């Protein structure tokens, strides 16, 4: 497949499936042992402050990308959480940002509420004034929700002269 990490993950799923079938529907005469390749090294690449400044300077031409980046940088939220963030999920009085809507089913990708720092809060207050009462999503293009910022992200990354490992997920780290 692609990477050693991908192969390891798929082999672990296969091993778990075999054990499950043996336990629930078996017994199997012979239970195969799946040997997993070693874990790949942990990610060593992170975004430095100077890289973040260069990216943000390039992203200023695309306001929704600048919003996406600032929210991700200050909250450490995942891409889908940032893109699904609604103004109703932000409490300016308590300075708490809900990263999942009320009633949303919790998944493996946990997203507990986060206290907003003063820098993020000042950006959000300014954007809220700019958007007006009718806006639903914090990160939007002409009022419509953005599903994937990939094209504008790649363009800003190239304009800033940053390496390819600078992806939206790097904001999570």
Image (cartoon, grey):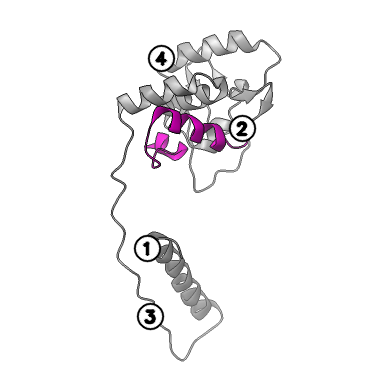
Residue 116 rendering spot, x and y as whole percentages: 44, 20
Name which of mark 1 and mark 4 comes first in the sequence: 1
Q: Nearer the viewer, mark 4 or mark 3?
A: 4
Residue under the image location 56 percent in, 81 percent down: 25
Residue under the image location 55 percent in, 43 percent down: 106
Q: Nearer the viewer, mark 1 or mark 3?
A: 1
| Residue beneath disc 4 | 119
Name which of mark 3 and mark 2 comes first in the sequence: 3
| Residue beneath disc 3 | 33
Name which of mark 4 and mark 3 comes first in the sequence: 3
Name which of mark 2 and mark 4 comes first in the sequence: 2
**Outermost right residue:** 134
| Residue beneath disc 2 | 102
Numbered range of the magenta stretch = 146-173
Whole-angstrom CA distance, mark 2 to mark 4, is: 25 Å
Q: Are marks 2 and 4 in contact (CB under 8 Å)?
A: no
Secondary element under disc 3, as helix, strand or loop, is: loop
- Does the magenta-highlighted stretch encompass residue 157? yes
| Residue beneath disc 1 | 4
Determine whether, in the image, residue 70 is placed left or right of residue 150: left
Q: Is residue 81 above or below residue 127?
A: below
Name which of mark 2 and mark 1 comes first in the sequence: 1
Q: Are marks 1 and 4 in contact (CB under 8 Å)?
A: no
Whole-angstrom CA distance, mark 1 to mark 3, is: 19 Å
Whole-angstrom CA distance, mark 1 to mark 4, is: 39 Å
Determine whether, in the image, residue 172 is placed left or right of residue 124: left
Q: Residues within 10 Å of mark 2 (few under 14, many from 20)?
A: few
Determine whether, in the image, residue 49 is placed left or right of residue 164: left
Quarter occupied by residue 39: bottom left
């Amino acid at each position: 497949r692609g990477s050693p990490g991908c192969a390891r993950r798929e082999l672990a799923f296969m091993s778990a499936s075999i054990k499950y079938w043996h336990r629930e529907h078996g017994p199997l005469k012979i239970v195969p042992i799946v040997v997993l390749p070693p874990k790949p090294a942990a990610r060593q690449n992170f975004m430095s402050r100077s890289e973040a400044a260069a990216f943000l300077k390039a992203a200023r031409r695309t306001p929704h990308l600048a919003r996406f980046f600032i929210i991700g940088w200050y909250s450490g939220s995942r891409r889908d959480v940032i893109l699904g963030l609604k103004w109703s999920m932000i409490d300016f009085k308590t300075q708490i940002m809900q990263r999942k809507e009320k009633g949303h089913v919790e998944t493996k990708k946990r997203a507990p509420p986060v206290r907003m720092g003063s820098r993020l809060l000042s950006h959000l207050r300014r954007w809220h004034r700019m958007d007006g009462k009718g806006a639903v999503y914090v990160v939007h293009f002409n009022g419509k929700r953005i599903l994937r910022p990939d094209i504008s992200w790649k363009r800003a990354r190239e304009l800033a002269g940053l390496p390819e490992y600078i992806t939206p997920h790097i904001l999570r780290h």
